[in-house]
Image (tube, rainbow, N blue to C red):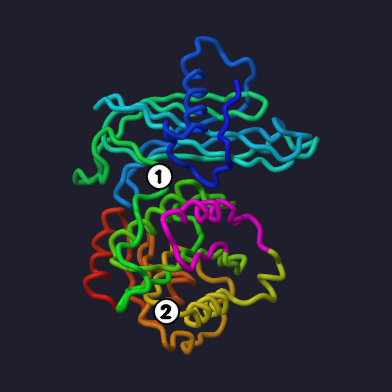
Amino acid sequence: MALALAAPLAGQVRLDHRDAAHRQAINALNRILTANEKPPSVLACRIDPIAPSLGFDLRLWAGYLAAIPAREFSGQGASAVTAMLRIDPIEPPGQSVYLGRKLNIPAIPATVPRRTYISAAGGFSLGAGRYRASVVLADANGRVCLKQWNIKAKPGRGGVSLLAPGAVASSSGTWTGFRSPTGKAGARRATILIDAYPVYRRRHVANLSWRDRMTLLNVLNSVLSQSGFDGARVIAFDLGRRQVVFDEPAFQPASFDPLADALAKVNLATIDYSTLSHGPSERQFLASLVRGVAAAESPGQVIFLSPQRPSPLRAGPRDDSVWEGIPRPVLFSLLPRPVAEGPVADFARSGRARVFNIYLPSDLAPAVRRLTADPP
């Protein structure tokens, strides 16, 4: 049974019965879930649920991690897998919510190592309550991988949750856009620089986990939603490789998906030796980044979103002239141990940055309110 969306999706979207292609995919998914027998062709995969936890946008979010053996596509050209989610609110009862996306699979050689996997992840936000989640992965040949599980979502600390009990939403973000036209007189703009680095400690770090990416997106969502800015440029950078991986001068709600895809592609496993030995130092790269921001028209408030990092490998000389003409920057340090430190924090402090240490999701909203009430 084919399960497909008509157009490639860069990110996960909520499916709408009123859209013909979405309705066709929803009906196909429901037929798979209600069938009493196994699908005629099985796609080998492993799907592990992610238990609900309170995000930095003060929403409960849950999800799944999927691993497909690369040999399932060996010897084929580039292909795709459709990932579909159905979430059924049980208590309180509610209407089923459908989410979907298309996962692009690169061309896989005819022979691949046995333990080589194609990884994917997805998720959603939800209010307190009980739910039944169903995930189906299907390829163009009709092969299907299915996983179902029950979810019990408890209210966050202090009963905090931005979604009503039984409510389900896509995990891309709740920000709906700037309230005021960007070009109006006295408009407040911001340039937000995101350090694409893991928020949560792991023994082996090859990329940003789904939880890392969602945390960075959640923090950005909260800053955009609550800061009162009228426009923003958002830049994401890979400090290890000295690369900008995303740059959107006029960030909008639709920009979350390409940003999420850019963060998913960050490779932290290897760094070119020439970059480490002969390339710019970490501080020099950050300085060039800020100089580029200063040269842009109306950069506004410069805000760093940075997880805790180890000490720099090559800090490089300090040059405070980089901050000339730029308002006092702001640093949101995520899960510092015990205070913000590392190359990004050190660089921001060289500009006399206001530092907000975010230890818990509940710390973020007060920090953003302080920034809004008392701009630097």
> Residue most toward the left?
158
Q: In what element is the residue under mark 2?
A: loop
Describe the element under mark 1 as helix, strand or loop.
loop
Graded by Cα atoms within 10 Å as few (under 14), some (14 to 19) or many (20 or more), the crowding at tag 2 reads: some
Q: Residue at x 56, y 30 (%)?
A: 137
Residue under the image location 69 percent in, 35 percent down? 70
Amino acid carrying label 2: it is: Ser
- Name the mark on residue 308: none
In this rendering, the label closer to the viewer, 2 or 1: 2
Decide whether residue 373 is among the magenta residues.
Answer: no
Toward the top, the furthest residue is 36
Please give left or right for residue 374 compared with residue 311 in the image: left
Task: Give the residues drawn in magenta, as a range.
Answer: 245-271
Image: 158 above or below 34: below
Q: Kindly identify the residue that appears in the image at 38 percent across and 31 percent down.
A: 97
**Could you say which quadrant of the image residue 276 lies in?**
bottom right
Do labels 2 and 1 touch, CB within 8 Å?
no
Quarter assignment of residue 280: bottom right
Q: Amino acid at mark 1?
A: Ser
Q: CA distance from mark 2 to mark 1?
A: 31 Å
Q: Which mark is residue 298?
A: 2
**Residue position for label 1:** 171
Query: Looking at the image, which is closer to me, 168 or 331?
Result: 168
Q: Compare residues 197 and 217 and report the one nearer the observer.
A: 217
- Residue 255 lies in the magenta stretch: yes
